[in-house]
Amino acid sequence: MSMERYILSRVIQIIIIFFIVMSIIFLLFRVIPSDPTSFLLTPSMTAEAKEAIREQFGLNEPIITQYYLYFKNFFHGNFGNSFYGGRSVMNIIKERMLNSIFLVTTAVILSYIIGITVGKAIAWKRGSKTEKFFVGLGLWFYTMFTPWLGILFLWIFAFKLHLFPLGGMITSEVWIANPSLIEKICDLIHHLILPLITYVVLWFGGYMLLMRNSMLETLREDYIITARAKGLKEKDIRDKHAARNALLPIVTAFAISISFSITGAVLIETVFSWPGIGRTIVEATLRQDYPLVQGAFAIITIVVLIANFIADIAYAYLDPRISY
Amino acid sequence: MDTILEIEELEMSYQTIKGFVSAVDNVSFKIMKGESMGLVGESGCGKTSLGMCIMKLLPENARIMNGKILFDGEDIVPKTEEEMRKIRWKGVSMIFQAAMNALNPVYRVGDQIIEAIQTHDNISKEEAREKVEKLYELVGLSPERMKNYPHEYSGGMRQRAIIAMALACDPKFIIADEPTTALDVIVQDQIIDEIVNLQKKLNMTMMYISHDISVIAETCNKIGVMYAGNIVEYTYTSTLFDNPLHPYTKALMSSFPSIEGPKKELKPVPGEPPNLLNPPEGCRFYPRCSYAEEICKKENPEFVEIEKDHFLACHKVI
Amino acid sequence: MIMRHDLITILKVKKMRVKKLSTGLTLLIVFAMLFSTFGCISEKEETPAPTTAAPTTAAPTTAAPTTAAPKVYEGLILPSGEKMAPMEILTLTPGADPTLNQEAVFIAEWWKKIGIDVEAKAMEKGALVQKIYWDRDFDATLWYIGGERFPLYLQYYYCEDEIYQYGWNFMQYRNPEYDSLSSEWLSIFDLDKAQERAFELQEMLAEDNPQIPLISDTKLTAYNNKKWEGWINQYGGVAGFDSMCTIDPVGGDTDNDILKIGLLKEPDTLNPLGTGFTETWTIINKIYCGGMWNPPTALYRYAPVSGELIPFLAEGDIEYDDATNTAIVKLKKGIKWHDGTELTAKDIKFTVDLMKEFEVPNYQDSVGFIDKVETIDDYTLKYYLTNKTVNFYHKTMMMIILQERKWSQIAEGARRKVDPTEYLTQCQITTPMGAGPFKFVEWKRGSYILLEKNPDWFFKDQTLPMGNDKLKYDLKVDKILFKFYASSETRILALKNGDIDICTIPAADIADFEADPDMTILEWGNDWLDFIGFNCTKPPFNDPAFRKALHYLIDKEFLVDKLQQGYAIAQYSVIPAINTFWCNPDCPTYGMGMSMEERIQKAIEILKGAGYTWESES
């Protein structure tokens, strides 16, 4: 199969999966025996007002009509408005997603790079004390409870040492004083560091162990012996021949982790008061803000599908044996 | 004639949980420039280990316990990894078995050969490419194939490419480790012819490792028969075929069909090779030897030159 | 939640081929996400065991050996002869409301002592509301009530009119006498008479026990005493409207005194028509005049501390004509909107008309009974009411006031929409226009909201009496910065760090703050109370004797002392005790001071008298 046809078939697959997922999301939120308007009631509302609210949210329609409208609106790029405050869901997601991407993508890429570099190095030095140390360290951090580490870091570095701000994305006092662009960027980075470190500390271990395992398997391959027989430099054997092949499974892992990390960021976002999409989803789910939850899940589904799609393409690029 | 490779009392062991496994034991032989030596023996007899010893490409748990490997007059046993790196491919190169993953699947075949050349010779990529093109022509491959990946080659083409790669740095000595195993018979034949041709054309000095004595008979002018870590007989091919002395050699010759010559009944070598973790005292072959005597159980026979250029380790014959 | 599983999944699948991966994993991931979100919900369904010592140890078992072994009552049999079916006390999950959840667990334990098969069942808020308000499918539930200075709910929570499906009277309490007394109460304008009637109503409820008031927790607020002083601890909380207008910076007034307040919830909108959230109103009631919750300050307001209705934007008292059900309200002169234009009677009339035209849900109790409003002149309004109701005082006079100039355009846009009300209540107000003491400056979503002082505020430097003192609204706060924190832990660190000046703290942290010389803690009574509501249509909960017996079994002192470590007040009326004017202090205090053994005796006695028996007796 040619690459073009492969891509086309994958796109069709993606659309089908997307439909299935969106339908599941739609149904899941409607089978819960709970009424979303319960959060909006105030004593001031008359019976008619309460009925009007249900009507306004389309909750009085038969479920099949709601389902139809759900997809119809979706194709018009309209996720509707949040039940709370009536803001356009698209705006909320856009804003929160950007914040999350800023933190999470940086964190994932950083932990990925660190994890892979260290994993590569310790696999090369297998059996050494360094390897044992890093494997232990990686596992220790990896199994650590996220909020606990986050709060510990906040307490030490922000509260005791005053090196970093106590969470948040920006220093309000700086931003209300008409800062220059550079000041704004510095402030953002200042806020980014601590959650970023927490993230990287918690996550690099996973990538590191993954890379180490993959690398150890690759090192047993015959072409590594060929490379050594050819008299190549250690570095070339490790990086060009071993790591390049060991990376293949990690690429897939990377695509998956990008999508996982969006939701995985919930805990970090909460500890560090980071206004991201993870927190938004949890809050919206708990108060049954259907439009927001649906919108957020739709976006995340799209991100996951695209990430996987990119991983497939990247895999094909990295591994010439894959033909479609 | 110059000696390219001289091995003296080489002993190499693998360290395992159960103890040392002596894979190469007390091996001595010489290879002169332009000679081609075949190393034959059953699987697990230590022939590949011996080949790897010469490149010093040993797994971590392998250790050269004793002996010397004189390559071009220099003992490579004490050499460091960095010193070895320079000898590899330039001094000794290797033809790997194509059925194995000897070529890195993610790089173009041509690039993998260019990489070898550029590591050792200070020439531009373009020059290296031209050289590889010539090598491709030499081994009977179309130079256009350089840009293909290993998986796009057939088994035979891959083997040719591996041969081209082994020749890339004009090595003084080439080890061919079962280069034709797993190829179908016709391709196998073509490859063997190719190697024989190249050997003549380039006056290659080589060591050909195979379990198939008939293949070795075609390609090598000398044969070393290896059994359980020992070389038991070493002489010219013609001598060996005319006058095999070691019982194992005899058994081996009758277990393979001859490509040329009259048909005869094939007789497998009876019994199993010994466990090298705990090899039998005395001659390692005696449990399977139909000529075994009392002394064979007690003493390992010495490897001696019983006539000119004919070395043998057997109590009975002496 | 997800973080642990995902890399394990990754590790497992790393050898898989890509094609399978993408299809399978996409579904897997989305399911994992959904599952984890819903997992959270369902996980909480199980009610945990009480953390504090179980109430069983409270009295009888440890009693001296001379006392007879306590009698065990098992299998309560109703007067009808049927054995009582197992019952559930519905409550919120510990995550949503730990106090409510724990109360239910304790109460279930106590009720078990008289042979009732009872379990506490925790649910998410939406599901609980559905069960009690929508489906009316429950035995008893833990819920909360309050938040209003004038407790209008004394009428609507218990009246027959509110028994319809979504109505407030989810307990379905029916008492025609109560109904007539309470609706009459709504038309009593004389405060003393109204108070008397309210007391009477409370007594009726206390006697009938459609609901059992439990406790109100005491809120703790800590503030940085090196930054601001003069906080007013009053009804509705410390950091309320009056505090913000009157506190003083420590160490002298400057031009840039910023008050920083840490909040856990970001407001949903700045549209005063679209939100009923108390958190949002904490912010927007500084910008607008009037509104909901946190005693609003509009034409009239409640006086600090005393709670008396006093004119604010209005001048003088309401001239109410009983004969025609009309009222004349006069407006102060010179009240300016934040854009400098004058706030006149036209704006107020406009607001009432707008609410009526668009049937804005949150203000129906303010305008529902108003026939029309006329502006006699720029400073005089005449209201025509369809019936006499105190809502006019406590709702209409405190209703939000919108600027005609700004909102007539919004209304114009709304009229062209399919659903004008939806548009009006949900449209995004990016620059709120009010006439309050603070102007809106900026909302950086996810981070902060900034307000700045309105130097032209009509009430600036004026005073209101507070007890024997006078409260001067001198607006020393130049800016208010509301900062949003996602977790209480971080917010507390921020307070200690000086990033914020004031915030609510959990009781667990009190010692820590007491030790800090920079911090002062203020305790203030919550104006909400927790109660148990019964399904008064379902036997045996329809039997007042049965409900009374259950009331006796609830040890409120235990809940205060043990569950809340003393930071709570036991409640005996449906109006929290902190609402001193309206709360009847003489409601019967079932079982106060009794031991559990005595409580059980009392309950048994009542039940026996009402014809209940026990399987263990016969």
Image (spheres, helix red, strand yellow):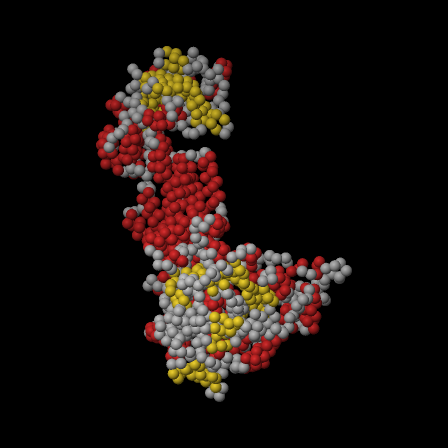
**Is C559 situated left or right of B282 in this image?**
right
Residue depicted at x 38% and y 23%? B79
In the picture, the quarter occupied by the N terminus of chain B is top left
Instruction: Give x and y (percent) for residue C171.
Output: 56, 72
Taking the view exactly as shown, the residue that stands out farthest to the right is C66
Taking the view exactly as shown, the residue that stands out farthest to the bottom is C323
Instruction: Give x and y (percent) for residue B264.
Output: 36, 22
Rendered position, A323 above or below C91: above
Rendered position, A118 above or below A68: above
- Viewer-nearest residue: C529 or C189: C189
- Viewer-nearest residue: C139 or B199: C139
In the picture, the quarter occupied by the C terminus of chain B is top left
- Viewer-nearest residue: B132 or C289: C289
- Tally of numbered tags: 0
Residue depicted at x 40% and y 75%? C335
**Quarter of the view holding residue A124:** top left
**Quarter of the view holding residue A52:** bottom left
Residue depicted at x 60% and y 62%? C566
Rendered position, B235 above or below C163: above
**Is B41 situated left or right of B134 in this image?**
right
Residue C453 can be seen, yes or no: yes
- Viewer-nearest residue: C197 or B275: C197
Instruction: Give x and y (percent) for residue A193.
Output: 41, 49
Residue C290 can be seen, yes or no: no
Rendered position, C28 above or below A80: above
Residue depicted at x 68% and y 73%? C610
